[in-house]
Amino acid sequence: MIRAVLVANRGEIARRIFRACRALGLRSIAVYSEADRDAPHVGEADEALPIGGAPASESYLNVDRILEAARKAGADAIHPGYGFLSENWRFAEACCAAGLTFVGPTPEAIRLMGDKTEARRVMAAAGVPVLPGSPGAVADLGDAERVAREIGFPVILKSAGGGGGIGMARATRESELQSAFATATRRAQAAFGTGALYVERYLERARHVEVQVFGDSQGTVVHLHERECSIQRRHQKLVEESPAPGLPEATKTVLLTAAVRGATAIGYVNAGTMEFLVDEAGPAFFLEMNTRLQVEHPVTEEVTGVDLVVAQLRVAGGEPLPWRQEEIVQRGAALECRVYAEDPAKGFLPSPGRITRVVLPAGDGIRVESGIGPDSAVPVHYDPLLLKLVASGGSRVEAIARMARALDGCAIEGVRTTIPFLRRVIAHPAFRSGMVHTQMVEQGAFNG
């Protein structure tokens, strides 16, 4: 039985998990780095412990210090949030070895899906469609060239050791492959500790559509429908929504069926997301599985009425899923805009500093998940996500109108943010019509 939960994270996601803990009557425990000593999440938990210096390697990525904090605070469970150690199977294993409940999937599921080439193999064996590409990591540049010629250009080189849009490089023709290989190897080594790469066919003007799945320890797996995530920069999401606009019913059925089949094949437990690319011509292909709670989970919560974090805690405590598949329906529409401390005019460069003023919107259908307050520091050490604006309505048109008003009513001073860029996205005719694809930001569709 879970009574006390340590959240091995910071910012808005830590605050979100504390809220779920309060709903269940669980004691919440925060950890913080030296840079986050005065951060809002620290004051919201029932107890807070320091875990080290500002660099993540000394604090939020330091397994020993997190486990020691859990021991001192008398935690029964650890929720990793997203990012940091959330998809680190060794951390999940260490939690279990320390007698703690890891609020997430099994270490084996994390390990299996973290190995991207093995994940492709397992999904293909389960009947989930995968993109043409190398069966495993390529041995060297020559091997990558051979695979690329077989499957045809353009191709994308990806890290075999991790996902999340990190460590990728694209080659539209053979003459670009050498440079792309070097770039992807360097990025993969820096991000995941291994330069191993695999090659996939690159889909131009594809949509990025993902499916929320959830499993329990009794073997039940359900889906909670799909999310559209095509508005991205550097392969990382900026705007998400549910339902995916204009998605053909037949394509949606393929995605939902494939997602449940894939999660069932690996005995998946707790919340996870199956990500797909939907080709302009119609076919859908498995991209990766994120074995954790997603940043964009609120849009699913808004359209299904399900509290995913509460469900995570209950399932981690051994309870069965509280819903049958036919009970999980989409009602209305919801959008999420991620507000980052970044300068879109300078290629979305981070904009660290100190926030001097914050005005957050409110009103019908508006939800704010924030990790900041007035006078909050935005450190250079972490992801610069400040907050998430979520707007919901009875229709997509209503949700978009509410989001537009929310963005107009949101002000953050002291650092540059993505708010002006997000306003342009929401106002753009292509977005309003639902005609989106993953290359829109890169191609300058929303430039001012």
Image (tube, rainbow, N blue to C red):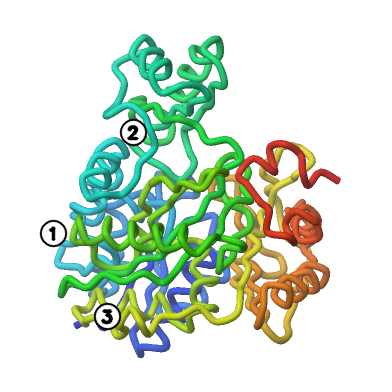
Residue type of the residue flagged with mark 2: Ala
In the displayed structure, would residue 127 be above or below residue 216?
above
Q: 147 or 48: nearer the eye? A: 147
Q: Secondary structure at mark 2?
A: loop
- Marks 2 and 1 sit apart, C-alpha to C-alpha, by 27 Å
As drawn, the label of residue 160 is: 2
Q: Position of residue 111 (x, y in %)?
A: 23, 47
Q: Position of residue 410 (x, y in %)?
A: 78, 69
Q: Which one is in front, 48 or 386?
A: 386
Q: Is residue 316 left or right of residue 332?
A: left
| Screen quadrant of the N terminus | bottom left
Q: Residue at x 36, y 51 (%)?
A: 289
Of badges 2 and 1, nearer the viewer stands 2
According to the image, label 3 marks what residue?
Answer: 321
Which numbered disc flags the more N-terminal residue, 2 or 3? Answer: 2
In the displayed structure image, the side of residue 79 where residue 71 appears, left or right: left
**Cα distance between the residues tagged 1 and 3:** 25 Å
Q: CA distance from mark 2 to mark 3?
A: 32 Å
Q: Residue at x 33, y 36 (%)?
A: 161
- Helix, strand or loop for disc 3: loop
The answer to whether residue 373 is left or right of residue 179 is right
Q: Which residue is mark 1?
A: 97
**Percent of width and height locating residue 237:** 58, 51
Q: Amino acid at mark 3?
A: Leu
Q: Which mark is residue 434?
A: none
Going from the N terminus, do you reach mark 2 or mark 1 first? 1
The reply, left or right, for residue 304 in relation to residue 365 is left
